Image (cartoon, helix red, strand yellow):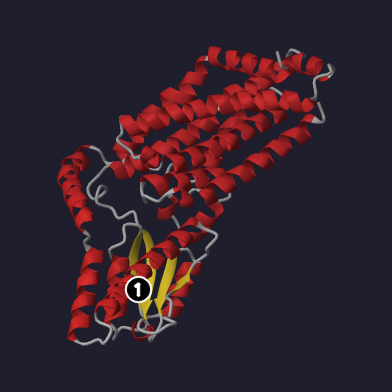
């Protein structure tokens, strides 16, 4: 048998024999998800608007088309508009993270729609963030619908006049309430009301991924103790004197931790989907991407804890520090959206914050896989960094 396979088999057997494995990886996440989900349920929580706050400055207020664009944006399920006249104040709020982004409709926008080079609204945001990309995507979608309506009206009545106005109005009405969407949304509204009264998705949509991530880190205690026990029994030192390359030993321990964590994620995500009625699987590829990279990151952190800890006491200390520091800063307990801009920036130094962004983009904001790439890339970067540190530390064994 390959040495890597032997190490994986041995580690998984040893970890699964420990009762703390099931306690930290399954029982406590489920218990705390239910506890915190019910604790945060309260008057007004269900109807809380989870959309991204986006400032809007309309410098073309006298144009009917710019007002139509504003209505399109206001109907978005991803962003929540806050109309303001002070552009400098909006730019400041975006810089201070009080607003996720800002959209500026330039003067002359409506008049330019009939020409060959129409003006485009501007998005003021950090496009390296999920919020900035989401705001830009919503603006592009709304502007595209409006441009399509104008082209349709010009095709029907190229000379303008009353027939053009009627065609434009019909096209805009069609975009605002397409027949298929009208039927679907009505059915959803009728069915959703009683479910929301029993299932506060807003609270569970945060506590479920938060507790999954927090107790995945807490579960590193058992994983790290496997490496610590190898060191105490001199088994690790004996392996290092054999022909087995160090990278194979590291890979074996790493993959064992990864398999355990990705299995935990799969079970708890199914629990959230089937029991808590969360829509993890509404975008299965996005959920898989975030869960996979988060498991890679946390497994690398577990390998680092095992490499650094010289005894069981240190393994416990490092694991608990990781759980409280990374979980607390990363928004596993309280959503970072409820904190100030400085705390949000500091919180994103924790990989937990990026994983929370990825999961909440699916559960709360209803975004597709495109909104998972940035959190996944950040988690993968942390995974590489933690694994590199663990490899460096193993050189001294």
Residue placed most toward the observer, 392 or 379: 379
Which x, y percent locates residue 380? 61, 43
Image position of 334 with respect to 261: above or below: below
Q: Name the residue located 72 percent from the left edge and 34 percent from the top edge.
A: 390
Residue placed most toward the observer, 147 or 139: 147
| Residue 290 as seen in the image, left or right of residue 72 | right
Q: Residues within 10 Å of mark 1 (few under 14, many from 20)?
A: some
Which x, y percent locates residue 190? 14, 46
Image position of 194 with respect to 241: above or below: below
Image position of 237 with respect to 152: above or below: above
| Residue 306 as seen in the image, left or right of residue 170 | right
Residue 29 visible at all = no
Residue 10 visible at all = yes
Quadrant of residue 101 in the image? bottom left
Which x, y percent locates residue 233? 74, 12
Q: Which residue is mark 1?
A: 147
Q: Name the residue located 38 percent from the left edge and 38 percent from the top edge.
A: 281
Q: Secondary structure at mark 1?
A: helix
| Residue 175 as seen in the image, left or right of residue 309 | left
Image position of 322 with respect to 230: above or below: below
Q: Quadrant of the C terminus?
A: top right
Quadrant of residue 65 in the image? bottom left
Which x, y percent locates residue 387? 69, 36
Q: Name the residue located 28 percent from the left edge and 63 percent from the top edge.
A: 75
**Total labels drawn:** 1
Residue placed most toward the observer, 146 or 287: 146
Q: Quadrant of the N terminus?
A: top right
């Amino acid at each position: 048998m390959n040495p890597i396979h032997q190490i994986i088999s041995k580690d998984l057997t040893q970890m699964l024999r420990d009762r703390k494995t099931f306690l930290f990886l399954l029982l406590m996440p489920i218990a705390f998800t239910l506890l915190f989900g019910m604790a945060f349920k309260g008057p007004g929580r269900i109807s809380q608007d989870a959309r991204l706050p986006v400032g809007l400055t309309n410098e073309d207020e006298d144009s009917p088309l710019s007002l139509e664009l504003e209505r399109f944006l206001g109907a978005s399920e991803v962003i929540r508009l806050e109309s303001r006249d002070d552009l400098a104040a909006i730019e400041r709020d975006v810089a201070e993270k009080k607003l996720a982004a800002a959209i500026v409709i330039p003067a002359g926008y409506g008049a330019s729609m009939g020409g060959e080079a129409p003006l485009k609204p501007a998005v003021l945001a950090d496009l390296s963030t999920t919020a900035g990309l989401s705001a830009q995507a919503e603006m592009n979608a709304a502007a595209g619908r409006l441009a399509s309506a104008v082209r349709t009206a010009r095709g029907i009545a190229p000379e303008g006049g009353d027939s053009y106005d009627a065609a434009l109005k019909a096209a805009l009405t069609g975009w605002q309430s397409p027949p298929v969407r009208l039927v679907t949304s009505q059915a959803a509204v009728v069915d959703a009301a009683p479910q929301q009264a029993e299932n506060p998705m807003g609270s569970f949509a945060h506590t479920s991924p938060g507790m999954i991530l927090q107790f995945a880190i807490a579960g590193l205690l058992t994983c790290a103790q496997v490496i610590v026990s190898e060191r105490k029994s001199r088994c690790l030192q004996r392996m290092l004197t054999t022909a087995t390359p160090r990278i194979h030993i590291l890979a074996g321990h790493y993959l064992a931790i990864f398999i355990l964590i990705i299995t935990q994620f799969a079970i708890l995500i199914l629990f959230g989907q089937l029991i808590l009625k969360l829509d993890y699987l509404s975008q299965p590829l996005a959920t898989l991407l975030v869960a996979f990279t988060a498991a890679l990151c946390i497994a690398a952190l577990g390998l680092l804890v095992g490499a650094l800890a010289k005894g069981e006491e240190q393994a416990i200390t490092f694991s608990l520090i990781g759980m409280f520091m990374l979980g607390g800063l990363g928004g596993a307990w309280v959503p970072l959206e409820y904190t100030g801009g400085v705390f949000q920036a500091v919180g994103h130094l924790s990989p937990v914050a990026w994983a929370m962004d990825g999961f909440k983009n699916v559960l709360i904001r209803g975004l597709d896989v495109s909104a998972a790439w940035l959190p996944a890339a950040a988690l993968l970067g942390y995974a590489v960094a933690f694994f590199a540190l663990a490899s460096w530390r193993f050189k001294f064994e």
